[in-house]
Image (tube, rainbow, N blue to C red):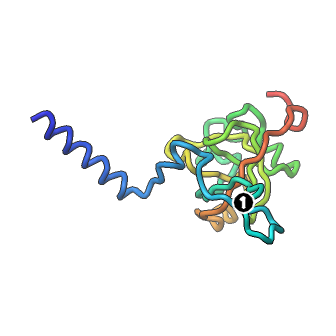
Amino acid sequence: MRKILLLTFVIAVVALWIGSGIVLTAMLAPEAGSKILAAGDPSGSVGNPTSALVREVTAYNVGRRSQTSGSPCIGATGQNLCRLIAQGLKICAANFVAPKTILNVEGYGECVVLDRMHRRFSHRVDIAMREEEVGKALEFGIRRLQVEVKSGLPEKWIGPR
């Protein structure tokens, strides 16, 4: 009887997992994913590939309590994201890399990970926009884009916590 219950449970979990559309490799190994060939390589050989993943990319408005936390300008790294965005720094939130990592998002450019997201969105990148750019963030929507993980920034560029 226990074996039948266990088998039924396993089948149900697998069925839910398949129906959810969650990609297991992205959850278990963020570095696993598609590879982009180095530009200008006429042979088409892998040579020196750049690792990139297709991720869901969204946008949020820093400074809006309804989209952030009780301290809407303070990111997960303890820095004032409202001030940094006003200075022109591109900031994003992501859970699959360490804070202060640079991500190169297709069509957007490089952003620095200075914030985190709810764990149910651990596969996403969330681009931070100014508080008054709500329409722009809504227009951005949810996109599936190439995201390249680059190295982190030196502490002197971002400042202390």
Tell me the quadrant of the picture where the C terminus can be found.
top right
Which quadrant holds residue 9? Answer: top left
Crowd band around label 1 with a 10 angstrom C-alpha radius: few (<14), some (14–19), many (20+): few
Image x and y of residue 155, in percent: 85, 32
Q: What residue is drawn where x is 68% and y is 35%?
A: 76
Q: Give the vertical position of 54 relative to 81 (above or below).
A: below
Q: Give the vertical position of 10 relative to 134 (above or below).
A: above
Q: In the displayed structure, does residue 55 sit left or right of residue 89?
A: left
Picture mark count: 1
Q: What residue is drawn where x is 79% and y is 39%?
A: 152
Which quadrant holds residue 53? Answer: bottom right
Q: In the displayed structure, does residue 89 sit left or right of residue 18?
A: right
Image x and y of residue 4, in percent: 14, 40
Q: Amino acid at mark 1?
A: Val
Image x and y of residue 14, in percent: 31, 50
Q: Secondary structure at mark 1?
A: loop
Q: Determine which residue is flagged by label 1.
A: 46
Q: What residue is drawn where x is 76% and y is 47%?
A: 150
Which quadrant holds residue 93? Answer: top right
**Residue furthest bottom in the image:** 42
**Residue furthest top in the image:** 161
